[in-house]
Image (tube, grey):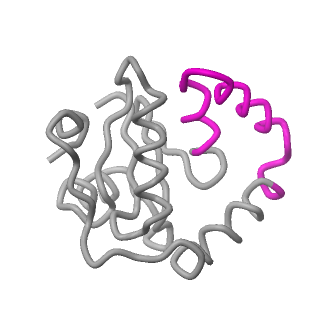
Amino acid sequence: MDRVILFDGVCNFCNSSVQFIIKRDSTGIYQFTSLQSDIGQKLLTEHNVPTELDSFIYLEDNNVYFKSTAALKVCRNLKGLWKFVYIFIIIPRPLRDMVYEIIARNRYKWFGKRDACMIPSPEQRKRFLE
């Protein structure tokens, strides 16, 4: 488990983000699990993740990244021009996180919510932790 993305499995925006990452992660370096899953809850506990963080968490080699830093670190390894988004890491984290927080706080209102976590396709299933 070198690179794991934990996401809100009932959030439409989060699920779309996972699909976006899968399409641009041609080497398959990222694995996924929902925050609501048993393994997601186990990983959160093992890494002492604060309970108020409930949208997007990135684990890489026993390091935990949250909010805008997590998103930028993931973009760094995507194919295409997305890797250049990582340049925004130079913006002070409080400013980046402020924008992230606005989106995270409104994600259900703007993008909707599912009744249950997404079910990955058979070819995607190997990328999801169970």
Above or below: residue 60 compared with residue 19? above
Look at the magenta stretch and give its main secondary structure: helix
Question: Does 16 lie within the magenta span?
Answer: no
User: Could you say which quadrant of the image residue 99 lies in?
Assistant: bottom right
> Magenta segment range?
71-95
Q: Position of residue 95 (x, y in %)?
A: 83, 57
> Which residue is at 42% across, 47% downward?
18
Q: Position of residue 7 (x, y in %)?
A: 40, 56
Q: In the depicted view, which residue is nearer to us: 1 or 78? A: 78
> Is residue 66 found left or right of 91 in the rendered image?
left
Q: Position of residue 123 (x, y in %)?
A: 19, 33
Question: Does 90 lie within the magenta span?
Answer: yes
Number of dots carrying numbers: 0
User: Could you say which quadrant of the image residue 79 lies in?
Assistant: top right
> Which residue is at 60% across, 69% downward?
104
Q: Position of residue 59 (x, y in %)?
A: 43, 40
Return the residue found at the far top.
Answer: 27
Where is the N terminus found, in terms of image quarters?
A: top left
> Which residue is at 43% across, 59% downward?
49
> Which residue is at 44% across, 26% downward?
25
Above or below: residue 39 compared with residue 116? above
